[in-house]
Image (cartoon, rainbow, N blue to C red):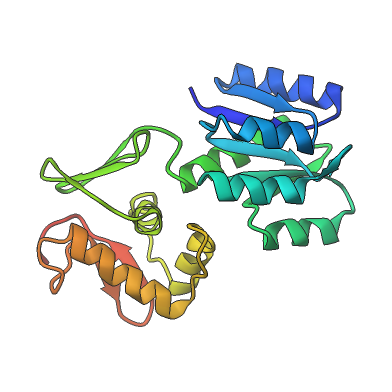
Amino acid sequence: MKRIFLVEDDPDIARNLSRLLGAEGYAVTRAVGQGEAMARLEGGGFDLALVDISLPDGNGFTVCTAIKQAMDIPVLFLTASGEEASVVTGLTMGADDYIVKPFRPRELVARIQAALRKYGRAGGVLRVGALQVDTAGGTVTRDGQEVFLSALEYRLLLVFANNPRTILTRERLLGELWDAAGEFVNDNTLTVYIKRLREKIEPDPAAPRYILTVRGLGYRLGDGHAE
């Protein structure tokens, strides 16, 4: 069961969200303000955080920063309509998405599921040729042998695995990886991580079978067989 960390001081909103998410199979842990949120972070173990920007004893920006420093999970802001400047600030500080109140329940659930997939936390096993990505355990194996990837290398592989029939431009990859591991990711850095990932997952990095270059367009996922 995926655990959602809800930071929301409004009791009615928190109650309705807890019911909605519980019905979807999520376990919800709630904090009513910045102070309680910081204390609950010490226990960890969350898969996603929903954070209200306006809190009685602080703000969601501080909570978002603390979450990102403590664990690699998506953070979605809950914000009142018309707070465009706050939304921009939140996204700049590392938030992954935002939901404007009042929101439609199905839209919220869809945004949560998309964020979990992006971080490989939706659960399940992705298989590509001899590669197997266990998104629940966060492990990668090739021919049954575990491949040890850094957080950013793992995220990069997930982007390809979750988009098997898509040509991914460098701009798209940079957008997916932005601040994924607390690092600044630029175009040169992306080239380095593509190279490192190939060195770890490809039988022959000089002749890639998984991360294929599409000249002039970007990259795409291969099936693991020689072309």
Asked if residue 37 lies left or right of residue 202, the reply is right
Image quadrant in which you'd find residue 216: bottom left
Residue 217 appears in which quarter of the rendering? bottom left
Residue at 77%, 35% in the rendered image? 35
Residue drawn 27% across and 67% down? 196
Vertical placement of residue 112 versus 91, above or below: above
Q: Nearer the viewer, residue 199 or 133?
A: 199
> In x, y percent, where is residue 210?
22, 60
Q: Position of residue 7 (x, y in %)?
A: 73, 34
Task: Determine whether, in the image, residue 81 is placed left or right of residue 225.
Answer: right
Position above or below: 90 against 120: below
Image check: 144 left or right of 156? left
**In the visual, does 161 lie left or right of 207?**
right
Closer to the camera in the image, 12 or 152: 152
Residue at the spot x=76%, y=62% of the render? 88
Q: Tell me if residue 20 can be seen.
A: yes
Q: Quadrant of the C terminus?
A: bottom left
Indicate whether 40 appears above or below 116. Answer: above
State whether residue 107 appears in this view: no
> Which residue is depicted at the point 90% across and 53% down?
82
**Could you say where residue 104 lies in the image, as x and y percent from the top left?**
75, 34
